Amino acid sequence: MSDDGTMTLAELRRRIQTGERLPRATLAALESDPRAGARELGRLLARRRRAERAETRRLDGLLVYERAARAEGLAVLCGVDEAGMAPLAGPVVAAAAILPEGMRPRGLDDSKKLDAPTRERLAAEIKDGAIAWAVGLATPEEIDRVNIYHAGLLAMRRAVLALAVRPDLLLVDARRIPGVDVPQRPIVHGDALSLSIAAASVLAKTHRDALMQELDLAHPEYGFARHKGYPTREHLAALARVGASSVHRRSFAPVRAVLGLGPGQRELFPRAAP
């Protein structure tokens, strides 16, 4: 800040780069400033504002299903999604999230499109601002007993039943959850089309990733912290070298192959404790 109270160009650049809101008059002043550095900051600020408007439009497009539901008089809307259907190890995790009507976390999208730091930032923002949120999971043993599809539904049901607030409507990613006495609206590719479902997808993914970090401490030979149990080359090589752990899913083909199990065969000895 200069002696007369105006901001220096360095201070302006810092505030623009950190996304701080600036008075509308700032852009016009920079664009008309005779200094080349000031005009460059004006162009930077203009680009940032265009990006902000584009992000506002994108988030607005993720509220189509929410607006339609509220037009029907359904005020408390809950997004539900799961994470961890494809991995060879660990639980499947689901989350349920009820966002207030005006909440639009910047950058929120299908969790698969986001990097880990962005997911962590958004998860913290969602938990802090949500009306209610909850997670549920199904264990590897339950996955093997009822199959992965039904285990995913079980995790979703547990997440919804754990909510502290009863929703008026569930917006669910492409499924209908059995055993839940709440109206539901399945949406194909819902995690990319509904803000509420996208929020649930971020909570489910970050919660499961944290669980896999913990399992990595108990089973460091597999690299769970890096691949989160997915069938990567590293994971398959570790399976072939070490064998299956207590948290591997016996109903998945690569694990069955390592255990030497054919169709319908069961292990002679039960899995050890995790």
Image: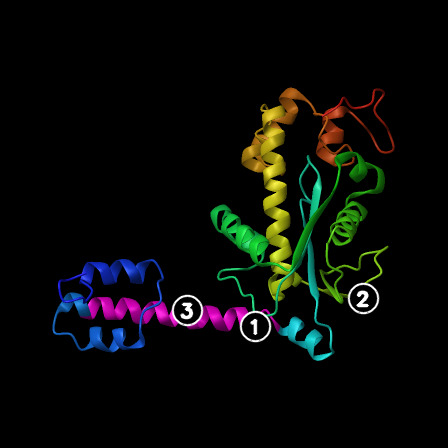
Q: Amino acid at mark 1?
A: Gly
Tags 2 and 3 touching, CB below 8 Å: no
Q: Earlier in the sequence, mark 2 or mark 3?
A: 3
| Position of 132 relative to 46 (above/below) | above
| Position of 205 relative to 67 (above/below) | above
Distance of label 1 from label 3 (alpha carbons)? 14 Å
For label 1, the residue is: 61
Q: Amino acid at mark 2?
A: Pro
Q: Does dot 1 land on a helix, a strand or a loop?
A: helix
| Position of 231 relative to 266 (above/below) | below
* Residue stretch in magenta: 39-63
- Residue 142 in view: yes
The residue positioned 62% from the left and 24% from the top of the image is 218
Residue 56 is a magenta residue: yes
Count of marks overlaid on the render: 3
The 10 Å Cα crowd at callout 1, few under 14, some 14 to 19, many 20 or more, is few
Distance of label 2 from label 3 (alpha carbons)? 35 Å
The residue positioned 43% from the left and 73% from the top of the image is 53
- Residue 219 in view: no
For label 2, the residue is: 183
Q: Position of residue 119 (x, y in %)?
A: 53, 50
